[in-house]
Image (cartoon, rainbow, N blue to C red):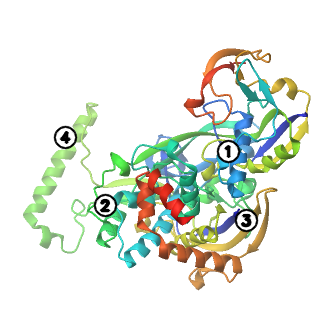
Amino acid sequence: MPPVRVTFALRTPVVIPYTDKHFDALLSWAAVQKAEFEGHEDPWAMQHDIGIAKHFGAQDWCFQAGLVTFDWIGERNQLHYIKRSKLEDYADAHMDGLLDRRPAFDAGRGSTKAGSYFAPIRWARTATAYAVVEDRSRFDSLLPWITHIGKLRHKDYGAVSSHSVDCDPMALEAWGKRNLPIGSDKAVQHAPSVGGLVSPYWKRANHTEILAFVG
Amino acid sequence: MNQAKQYVIAVDIQTTSPMHITAIEKGAYDPATQRLARYDGKGIGCSLTRTQSLAHSALVQENGNVYTPLVPVIPASTIAAKLRRAAADQIANSLVQRQLQISPDAYNVLTSGMANTELKADDKLPEVLRMARKDAFLSLFGGTSFAMSAHSVIAEGWPIVGSTLSSLMTPPIGDVQPFGSLSEMTAVLPIVRKNDVADMQGKHLQDVVGFDNLVAYAQTEGVNRSESKAKKAAKEEGKKTDLRTLNAVEVVKTGVAFALRIEVTAFDAAQLGLMLLAMQEVLREGQFGGKAARGFGRFIATGTRLYEVDPNTRVKTVISTVIEGKDTGYAFADNDVVNASVVAAQDYVDAISPQLIEAFTRADAKTLKQMYKEAA
């Protein structure tokens, strides 16, 4: 089971993640994208088939994949964007007979509410992650599918221009810098907390007692 | 199993009039020194155009200061909103022609993608996802109360200059422009609001308004102005009494080239075709940003290209030109992939059902599951 270091070169600014980003989450996302592209009946079922070795605690398990770290450059900036509906469009649609009833338009509330949004962005030269690989072929097949890292992928933020994989014994220790199951013998700079151990990390229903990396 | 395909639509454009896309930050322009400050400083208020910093191109100057260049951009959200609206218009026109109607909420979901009820991401059953993937519009643009992800990536419109080349999704189609700094690509224009009554301008002013009314207006204005001055002298807040204003606006100069890049994951030909129809409409409209009534933001396409992407290697292969020049009315290029996609998209638009749009609008997973079963 080779320990590896994966380095992603980035093409566009990254939306600064407000939580730790686990490398296996990127691979799971890639696995779902690949499965969907290939016409899989239930792409979500493929999210944990990522070729990474598993680590078992007292009851739960996690992948041996560490947190993604960024080589930031420059200052943090704010990306500002607005969402709004155009009153004129509604008027035109109503006049054309497209709408089945007279529309109500309120930019202050409801579905036509306008909004002003900010996202913190910053340039990064690279993003790096460590992992212990179990199925190299599956792992390698997923890496090109990690096309973006972070939020606003659909606006091309955090775009990956290339990646490289290097065998690195440091990964045997470095992967442990992540959420670990209770009872894990890898916990060094960790504290009891509540969070996810596998993707989807954002889903509260999956959250459980864990050992969170605090180093 | 159907194999999807990935494409990149690349369009290089060039501004043919000043372009301004308002940034949230406000600047100040000092006419005496002709300097623009990108903060609220000395001088007249200046509305800034949207820019991005290029930290990767930062230079350390001789004095030790770090110089981070800024470049003007066309925000991805501006481009995406235009494309979504153009695609939604195709659907709306088809429904009107077929004398079919949709609810205002459904119309809102089409044009903006905003949720109509609370988000129901947990109701995204596999059948709902498959229905959304099959539907060209929803697959491309996503949204709705299901918080569907978009199968398109619409990039920031970067200027085509040396310092942005590494940020482009695909290389420029035409030449790289020699601009180095923001000031070479932008200019500051004055925006003057006149008050013809106070200035006693206009051939028929006295006939239309009347001499007595003009005198009364001048007297009131005079009183207001002296009160305001007195308050200002006493450092109190006074009302603005003069309708004449001088502001400045930062614009991208005419002749600056930008790269529009869109990646499409197409689960069938109609999905690429619908994005092409939308792009054609955006090019025909030929305008980005604010102050359109003053003729700002006009542009022309100078080159287009369609790539196929191998998602397993990320290698991009050029298929052909995708849309011809403005002199052809931005007609589609004669190419098998382009032709088949556009025909499939037109068939999709001609047949789209209001029931499907309404079900996604109401986040009605049960109905969508039933529709998926019937379609299968």
Camera-nearest label, 3 or 4? 3
State the separation of the CA atoms marked 3 and 2. 43 Å
The residue carrying mark 4 is B227
Q: Which mark is residue B172?
A: 3
State the separation of the CA atoms marked 3 and 4. 59 Å
Sequence-earlier tag: 3 or 2: 3
Specify the amino acid type for callout 3. Pro
Sequence-earlier tag: 2 or 4: 2
Callout 4: helix, strand or loop? helix
The residue carrying mark 2 is B194
Host chain of mark 3: B
Nearest the eye: B361 or B18? B361
Q: In which quarter of the image is residue A1?
A: top right
Is B241 on the left-hand or right-hand side of B269?
Answer: left
Q: Quadrant of the N terminus of chain B?
A: bottom right
User: How many marks can you see?
Assistant: 4
Camera-nearest label, 2 or 4? 2
Query: Can see residue B75?
Result: no
In this rendering, do the residues under marks 2 and 4 share a single chain?
Answer: yes
Camera-nearest label, 1 or 3? 1
The residue carrying mark 1 is A45
Characterize the local packing of mark 1: few (<14), some (14-19) or many (20 or more) Cα atoms within 10 angstroms: few
